[in-house]
């Protein structure tokens, strides 16, 4: 077991002060509070006697304590900085300031942290921008010098120097400071504050575990070291300090060592190349699977009794801290002893998504276009944002705990509202209507009352929302949700206090939203608990000075760890570098040090990265993995075993779930092998036909009937038939703002049905104006929430109008003698099907779009809004295939017409004729056929069904042959217990299937 850095440090400090009474005079400064906690534990283990502990403090707390000045919060700082800017530039608006205010505040922080000569820096920027403006003024420049945005841009940089000094002066007068300002103040007055203070015994300082010091930190430490009152203890490795002098991880430490200002160097060790390490790299397809891999690894270690201990915990490091919640969910429920060191960003919380949805709701305005082309805006909510709010997990949980009645059959106000929106297809909703459905409930008043343009109104609304939700969550055990509400409440209180009277006019609703979101982005929910746990879930910066023997690091992707190269600053890159401010290359060096320092004393390392570039933070593996593979491993002389894994889901012809892993070792000079760790799932699952399922099918065939669509669906994909007809699975009903293909077809069918009934069946002529009126009326009935005057709906409306006009015109010209006998005609027929345990009265049913008569031929017609060419000829050798397989869309159309023609023949045989419109039609005088009207291919006219059972087409043989095929289908396929419901091999059928996500296609 390797001694940790903090244990070695504690032992060293004890050896320097054998009289334990001296320990209370020490001040030990560490990078983080967490490292300070563990150093105190290490100190306690060095002595069997009780003693007064030394001061062990994080560097931020040390500076704040010694400089005796209030470090202000970011909310008030942003407003105070704006006040100073307003004094310098009368034309500045808060809206424009908010775009770069936080960035400028960070720049001021760094300027002071790095003790930059502000006069030199801002004069440099002013001169550089003068040159830039001079270039803009050139005659050939494409940029207008009169642009307001351009003037504001140059005005900003010309004011930076004055704002910086005025801002600091204003803060100092009120004994306040931003963080960097406090560091600078202590650094510039370190002798007076730290050395000349009245101490009977001079305190002794130890600075432990630092790496990339800011100029202020370096000056503070140097002052104490030069006065012989401080020691520095570094944590570094010979690999990046000596063996690999170009390694970016040792960039800063090599500089401090070579400068020799810290005295005797403590310590460099040889852990990276001198100790045994087992390094595993996992390539996973998406970000969320990283957490699953980490959770499974830790669960496996726990099962083996290697899940860590208080003295030697397991570390799961999140390079991307947004993975915290997925990581917590990825752990097994049995794992309860863990510690989370990072805070949960409020912006990544569920509460923020609700806040965001409410802003989206308020900013939604219904916009319509009048017939004269004017855009009319009406303050109505869009259905999507309303349903998004009502379906939010916080609101749904409130519904379950506060609104749900004991009788679950009674709808809540939320369920009523969603049902009304969907059934009435309401796209835009008036707030008054929502309050009516919500029965004026306080929740609905809070969610759906219109805000004015005053930020205080919004704050009051959020207070009301918190009060409503708090009454529910205070009695539940969900601590995180409760913490969300509390933290947001305190943020609102802080914001309300800051928005004093002089600030009110500066914020409109959109500006307030931007400012609130900036505060939310900076706000974290802190986790508190016992730091000593066998599992530590930790952010990369919190690992400073800590060691883990077994560690998992997630998000090892380039652009995440290290971060993408970007200069998030108003100060140009070249000027920042020249002045001595840190740039992205310095940040890369810092991250490299953190990474290699974590590896130093670890012996079991697991690195996970995402392979898919289209997923969140995925794509290229981190350069640090490549450095291990190609630089560290070859130099390790066999002490490092490097293994790569690929985690993926693979389809197999098996019903079991299996996880296999091959292990491959790598020698220092060989290319690492790829190890596949595969999660295997079956993709060939079936649903058996149980006795209960068969009984349901038989009852349905007898009572409901077998339709052509049912027959076609089963032949195309029996699993789809099962989901739709047996299990009753259906898509959620949704509000549509534009017509889909099915909606368009239903509308055309309804229009043609009315025209047939009201005009053509009575032999009345119909004008184009009457056709257009029917189109409008049916559109209003079917699509109450659609706007026919804008977007795709307008185009589809014009297409439908022209389609119906052209179809009726073509019919008049082509078939003057055509008579419409019936429309939407419902027909049924019944015959017996012998089964092994009796017989079944099979009912065949259908709804025919139109029955028409032309020259002694009764035509069974079906409308198709899609384009149909002539159906393929049916030869005797293809007949069985057409009637029993679902691998061709044209065969579906043939079978549909076959069922319709069969139903007509069956009725004429059963009733000795067909009675329609007061007339009788007998088989000896009239021929029967079936076909389609393609409304996108009107010139084709009536497209006849090519199906024939033989040379003779008499009704008796047609019915007999049809029933033989239907009996075969029912016995051999639908009711065959040995043929389960299964996925189709006809993959084209899966393209638009509603259930493909369920079956895995």
Image: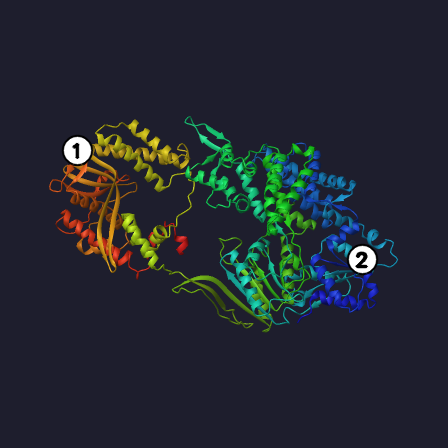
Contact, CB < 8 Å: mark 1 with mark 2?
A: no
Taking the image as shown, residue 939 lies to the left or right of residue 855, namely: right
Taking the image as shown, residue 539 lies to the left or right of residue 673, namely: right
Front residue of this view, candidates 652 and 164: 652
The spot of residue 26 in percent (x, y) is: 80, 60
Rendered residue at 28%/35% (across/down): 753
SS category of the residue bearing label 2: helix
Sooner in the amino-acid sequence: mark 1 or mark 2? 2
Determine which quarter of the picture holds residue 493.
top right
The residue where tag 2 is placed is: 224
Front residue of this view, candidates 702 and 18: 702
Residue 584's tag is: none
Rendered residue at 71%/62% (across/down): 38
Circle 2 Cα neighbour tier, 10 Å, few/some/many (<14 / 14–19 / ≥20) = many
The residue where tag 1 is placed is: 817
* Residue lying at the far right of the rendered structure: 200
Is residue 284 at least partly visible in the picture? yes
Is residue 32 at least partly visible in the picture? no
The spot of residue 48 in percent (x, y) is: 78, 69
Q: Nearer the viewer, mark 1 or mark 2?
A: 1
């Amino acid at each position: 077991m390797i001694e940790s850095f903090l244990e070695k440090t504690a032992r060293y400090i004890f050896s320097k002060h054998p009289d334990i009474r001296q320990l209370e005079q020490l001040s030990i400064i560490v990078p983080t509070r967490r490292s300070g906690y563990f150093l105190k534990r290490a100190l306690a283990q060095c002595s069997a006697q009780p003693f007064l502990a030394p001061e062990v403090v994080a560097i931020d707390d040390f500076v704040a304590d010694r400089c005796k000045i209030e470090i202000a919060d970011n909310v008030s700082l942003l407003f105070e900085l704006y006040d100073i800017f307003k004094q310098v530039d009368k034309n500045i608006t808060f809206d424009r300031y908010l775009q770069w205010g936080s960035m400028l505040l960070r720049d001021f922080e760094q300027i002071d942290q790095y003790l930059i000569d502000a006069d030199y820096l801002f004069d440099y920027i002013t001169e550089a921008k003068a040159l830039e403006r001079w270039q803009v003024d050139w005659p050939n420049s494409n940029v207008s010098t009169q642009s307001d945005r351009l003037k504001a841009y140059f005005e900003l940089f010309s004011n930076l120097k004055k704002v910086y000094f005025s801002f600091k002066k204003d803060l100092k007068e009120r004994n306040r400071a931003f963080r960097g300002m406090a560091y600078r103040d202590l650094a510039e007055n370190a002798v007076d504050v730290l050395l000349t203070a009245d101490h009977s015994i001079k305190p002794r300082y130890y600075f432990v575990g630092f790496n990339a010091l800011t100029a202020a930190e370096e000056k503070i430490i140097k002052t104490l070291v030069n006065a012989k009152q401080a020691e520095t203890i570094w944590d570094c490795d010979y690999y990046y300090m000596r063996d690999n002098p170009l390694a970016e991880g040792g960039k800063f430490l090599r500089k401090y060592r070579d400068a020799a200002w810290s005295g005797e160097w403590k310590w460099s060790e040889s852990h990276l190349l001198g100790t045994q390490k087992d390094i595993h790299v996992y390539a996973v397809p998406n970000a969320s699977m990283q957490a699953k891999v980490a959770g499974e690894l830790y669960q496996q270690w726990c099962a083996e009794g290697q899940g860590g201990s208080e003295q030697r915990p397991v570390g799961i490091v999140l390079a991307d801290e947004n993975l915290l919640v997925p990581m917590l969910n990825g752990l097994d429920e049995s794992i309860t002893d863990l510690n989370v060191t990072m805070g949960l960003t409020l912006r990544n919380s569920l509460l923020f998504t609700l806040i965001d949805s409410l802003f989206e709701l308020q900013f939604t305005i219904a916009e319509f276009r009048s017939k004269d082309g004017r855009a009319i805006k009406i303050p109505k909510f869009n259905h999507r944002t309303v349903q998004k709010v009502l379906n939010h997990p916080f609101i749904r949980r409130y519904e379950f705990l506060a609104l749900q009645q004991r009788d679950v059959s009674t709808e809540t106000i939320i369920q009523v509202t969603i049902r009304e929106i969907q059934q009435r297809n309401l796209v835009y909703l008036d707030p008054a209507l929502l309050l009516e459905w919500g029965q004026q409930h306080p929740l609905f008043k809070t969610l759906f009352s219109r805000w004015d343009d005053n930020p205080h109104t919004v704050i009051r609304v959020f207070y009301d929302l918190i009060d409503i939700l708090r009454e529910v969550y205070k009695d539940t055990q969900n601590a995180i949700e409760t913490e969300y509400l509390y933290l947001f409440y305190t943020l609102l209180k802080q914001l309300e206090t800051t928005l004093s009277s002089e600030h009110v006019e500066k914020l409109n609703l959109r500006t307030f939203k931007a400012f609130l979101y900036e505060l939310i982005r900076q706000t974290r929910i802190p986790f508190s608990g016992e730091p000593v746990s066998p599992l530590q879930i930790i952010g990369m910066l919190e690992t400073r000075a800590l060691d883990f023997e077994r560690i998992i690091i997630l998000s090892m992707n380039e652009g995440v760890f290290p971060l993408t190269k970007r200069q998030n600053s108003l100060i140009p890159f070249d000027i920042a570098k020249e002045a001595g401010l840190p740039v992205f290359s310095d940040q890369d060096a810092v991250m490299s040090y953190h990474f290699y320092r974590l590896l130093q004393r670890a012996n079991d390392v697991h690195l996970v990265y995402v392979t898919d570039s289209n997923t969140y933070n995925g794509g290229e593996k981190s350069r640090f993995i490549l450095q291990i593979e190609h630089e560290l491993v070859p130099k390790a002389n066999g002490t490092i075993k490097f293994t790569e894994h690929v985690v993926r889901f693979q389809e197999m012809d098996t019903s079991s779930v299996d996880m296999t892993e091959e292990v491959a070792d790598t020698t220092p000079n060989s290319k690492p092998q790829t190890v596949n760790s595969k999660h295997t799932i079956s993709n060939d699952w079936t649903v058996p036909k149980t006795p209960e399922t068969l009984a349901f099918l038989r009852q349905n065939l007898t009572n409901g009937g077998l339709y052509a669509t049912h027959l076609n669906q089963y032949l195309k994909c029996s699993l789809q038939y099962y989901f739709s007809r047996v299990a009753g699975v259906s898509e959620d009903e949704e509000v549509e703002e534009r017509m889909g293909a099915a909606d368009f077809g239903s509308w055309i069918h309804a229009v043609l049905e009315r025209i047939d009934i009201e005009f053509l069946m009575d032999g009345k002529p119909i004008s184009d104006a009457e056709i257009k009126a029917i189109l409008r009326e049916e559109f209003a009935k079917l699509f109450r929430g659609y706007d026919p005057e804008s977007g795709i709906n307008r185009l589809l409306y014009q297409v439908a109008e022209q389609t119906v006009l052209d179809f009726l015109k073509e019919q008049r010209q082509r078939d003057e003698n055509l008579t419409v006998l019936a429309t939407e005609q419902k027909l049924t027929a019944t015959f017996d099907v012998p089964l092994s345990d009796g017989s079944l009265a099979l009912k065949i049913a259908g709804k025919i779009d139109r029955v028409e008569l032309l020259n002694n031929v009764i035509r069974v017609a079906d409308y198709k809004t899609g384009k149909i060419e002539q159906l393929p000829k049916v030869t005797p050798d293809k007949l069985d295939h057409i009637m029993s397989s679902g691998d061709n869309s044209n065969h579906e159309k043939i079978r549909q017409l076959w069922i319709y023609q069969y139903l007509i023949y069956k009725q004429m045989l059963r009733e000795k004729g067909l009675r329609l419109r007061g007339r009788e039609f007998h088989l000896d005088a009239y021929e029967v056929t079936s076909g389609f009207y393609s409304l996108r291919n009107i010139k084709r006219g009536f497209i006849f069904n090519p199906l024939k059972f033989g040379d003779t087409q008499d009704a008796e043989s047609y019915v007999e042959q049809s029933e033989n095929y239907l009996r075969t289908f029912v016995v051999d396929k639908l009711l065959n217990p040995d043929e389960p419901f299964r996925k189709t091999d006809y993959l084209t059928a899966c393209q638009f299937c509603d259930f493909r996500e369920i079956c895995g296609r």
